[in-house]
Image (spheres, grey):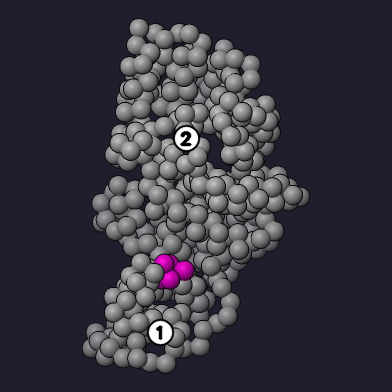
């Protein structure tokens, strides 16, 4: 098996093995470290010597032995047991998959969103600390400390390895889905750096969303989130030029969109809307499906998009939702109507000097034949984003309308 195939297999098995160990031993921090060590050993051994007949059992055995080593704090014994662990018969592996329980644990409410995201990528995603640090452009030591603090806070909170009580399960699930949403967004449009996106991070979010949906096939929001990710990721190849410059949605070559992802995402979006309750991810997936259904930008059903944003704004008020509704409103009632709606965000501290508000306002001023106003706002927007790809795009728009 190739190294890449082994890495894919390990990412699939790591959360299953970790869940089994935590359920058995009840030590999240120690179990997580032991599983990561076992996965690192497998990453070296399996491509060279072949994947064992029971790869999950192999990982469970090795990780269990490493955990015992840690608990006994006996270096000599650790060396002896580690040397024989890979040769031992696999321990009995439980048939249950504790991935969902593990996701709930990593998204514990005592943690910050940043810590929830990092811990999810580490424990459930199987990414190394170095990989997570690179994804979020922070030093590895900083990310290691963040993950360590997160595990310590979970331990201090006295959390047990079990699904939350029914009364809080729904709320905790929303946190899990939100963390996966944040991971995908950072992968789809990086908040900083030279590249517009980080496709490896987006793909990991999709993989985790598939995992969550497999555990909760009847949950409309879990299905809607996966649909939204697939429909959005389908546009990736058309979002940049060969030089890496950003291409806006209305100028993209739709022949380059991934039709297989669109078809799958559209079916999931439809399925999610059949759920008894309606949530924000289902509505966002419906909006993405409407865009995907249009053969050209001119054929987009903007009235349907605007209607969906109106509902979304009602059930999940958010300044970004209002901003996106302003774009749809401008397409149906003209740029001045969109600008009037944007003005309602001027007093929102969350949007103060945000490059998205500045750039959308500039876009609508350009459509309203106000090149001078558009120029100034495009320039301000370019200075307000840390993404170099977005900076280049906004500067090019400014140059195009410069009086």
Segment colored magenta: 8-12
In this view, 299 is above or below 140? above
Query: Residue at position x 32%, y 76% from top?
Result: 47
From the viewer's side, name the closer residue of 151 and 10. Answer: 10
Task: Determine the secondary structure under disc 1.
Answer: loop
Q: Position of residue 369 (x, y in %)?
A: 48, 8
- Judged from this view, the residue extending furthest toward the left is 76
Quadrant of the frame with the N terminus: bottom left
Residue drawn 74% across and 49% down? Answer: 274
Q: Is residue 362 left or right of residue 83?
A: right
Is residue 102 visible to us here? yes
- Give the label on residue 52, or none: 1
Q: Which residue is mark 2?
A: 253
Q: CA distance from mark 2 to mark 1?
A: 45 Å
Residue 10 sits inside the magenta stretch: yes
Along the polypeptide, which appears first: circle 2 or circle 1?
1
The majority secondary structure of the magenta stretch comes to helix
Q: Is residue 71 visible?
A: no
């Amino acid at each position: 098996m190739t190294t890449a195939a082994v890495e894919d297999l390990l990412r699939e098995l790591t959360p299953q093995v970790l869940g089994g160990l935590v359920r058995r031993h009840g030590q999240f921090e120690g179990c997580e470290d032991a599983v990561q060590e076992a996965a690192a050993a497998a990453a070296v051994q399996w491509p060279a010597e072949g994947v064992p007949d029971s790869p999950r059992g192999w990982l469970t055995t090795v990780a269990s032995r490493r955990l015992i080593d840690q608990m006994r704090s006996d270096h000599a014994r650790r060396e002896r047991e580690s040397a024989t662990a890979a040769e031992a018969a696999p321990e009995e592996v439980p048939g249950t998959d504790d991935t969902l329980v593990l996701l709930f644990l990593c998204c514990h409410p005592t943690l910050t969103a940043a810590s929830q995201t990092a811990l999810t990528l580490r424990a459930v995603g199987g990414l190394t600390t170095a990989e997570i640090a690179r994804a979020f452009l922070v030093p590895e030591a900083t990310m290691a400390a963040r993950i360590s603090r997160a595990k310590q806070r979970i331990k201090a909170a006295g959390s047990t390895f079990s699904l939350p009580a029914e009364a809080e399960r729904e709320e905790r699930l929303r946190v899990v889905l939100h963390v996966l949403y944040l991971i995908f967004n950072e992968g789809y449009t990086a908040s900083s750096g030279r590249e517009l996106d980080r496709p490896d991070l987006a793909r990991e979010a999709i993989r985790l969303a598939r995992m969550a949906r497999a555990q909760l096939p009847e949950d409309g929001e879990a299905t809607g989130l996966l649909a939204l990710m697939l429909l959005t990721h389908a546009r990736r190849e058309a979002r940049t030029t060969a030089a890496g410059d950003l291409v806006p949605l209305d100028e993209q070559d739709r022949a380059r969109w991934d039709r297989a992802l669109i078809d799958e995402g559209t079916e999931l979006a439809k399925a999610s809307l059949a759920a008894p309750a309606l949530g924000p991810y289902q509505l966002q997936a419906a909006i993405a499906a409407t865009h995907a259904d249009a053969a050209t930008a001119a054929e987009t059903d903007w009235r349907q998009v605007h209607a969906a944003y109106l509902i979304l704004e009602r059930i999940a008020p958010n300044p970004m939702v209002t901003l996106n509704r302003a774009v749809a409103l401008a397409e149906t009632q003209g740029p001045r109507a969109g600008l009037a709606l944007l003005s309602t965000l001027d007093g929102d501290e969350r949007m103060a000097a945000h490059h998205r508000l500045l750039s959308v306002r500039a876009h609508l001023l350009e459509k309203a034949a106000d090149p001078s106003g558009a120029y100034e706002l495009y320039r301000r927007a370019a200075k307000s984003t840390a993404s170099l790809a977005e900076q280049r795009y906004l500067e090019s728009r400014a140059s195009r309308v410069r009086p």
